[in-house]
Image (cartoon, rainbow, N blue to C red):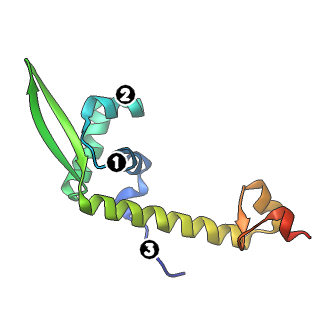
Amino acid sequence: MSGPDLDPLLLTKQRMFILCMLADMESHEFSLLCKRFDQTAAAISEQIRELRTAEYVRVQWGVNGDLRRMSVRLTRLGRIRLVSHVLALQGIVQKACDLMGPAAADLAGCRVGGMGAEELEK
């Protein structure tokens, strides 16, 4: 099977979901990420550290009154890797759907060869 490869860093769903949330290429407050994913600051911070090390995100610090605020933004590389990873996942799902029989494909919500299961059974 050829096509885009899965990104090992994005096999952790929290990292992939963080990049998906950042895909609009806007900066997002760290606290919003924690709330959105219902995770502790330490858990999200660890995921962001990994993404930052890989240069998938950029982190900026600011001050608002007495509070330090962190915002996170997707980099161009991060966006390229996210899109490639999602395309690879889609390819894997499509291949799995193509290998299923029509009944199983229908249960999985697949379209096999561009057709739904009901069209294949005709």
Horizontal and vertical percent for residue 108? 72, 56
Read off the residue under disc 3. Answer: 4
As shown in the figure, which amino acid type bears the numbered disc 3? Pro
Image quarter (top left, top right, bottom left or bottom right) of the C terminus = bottom right
Read off the residue under disc 2. Answer: 35
3D distance between C-alphas at marks 1 and 3: 22 Å
Q: Residue at x 26, y 45 (%)?
A: 48
As shown in the figure, which amino acid type bears the numbered disc 2? Lys
Tag in front: 1 or 3:
1
Observer-nearest of 73 and 1: 73
Horizontal and vertical percent for residue 50? 25, 51
Vertical side of 23 occupied by 1: above or below: below
At mark 1, the secondary structure is loop
Residue contact at pointers 1 and 3, CB within 8 angstroms: no
Taking the view exactly as shown, the residue that stands out farthest to the bottom is 2
Closer to the N terminus: mark 1 or mark 2? 1
Residue contact at pointers 1 and 2, CB within 8 angstroms: no
Q: Residue at x 21, y 52 (%)?
A: 52
Quarter of the figure with residue 44: top left
As shown in the figure, which amino acid type bears the numbered disc 1? Asp
Read off the residue under disc 1. Answer: 24
At mark 2, the secondary structure is helix
> Crowdedness of circle 1 by 10 Å Cα count: few (<14), some, many (20+)?
few
Horizontal and vertical percent for residue 55? 20, 58
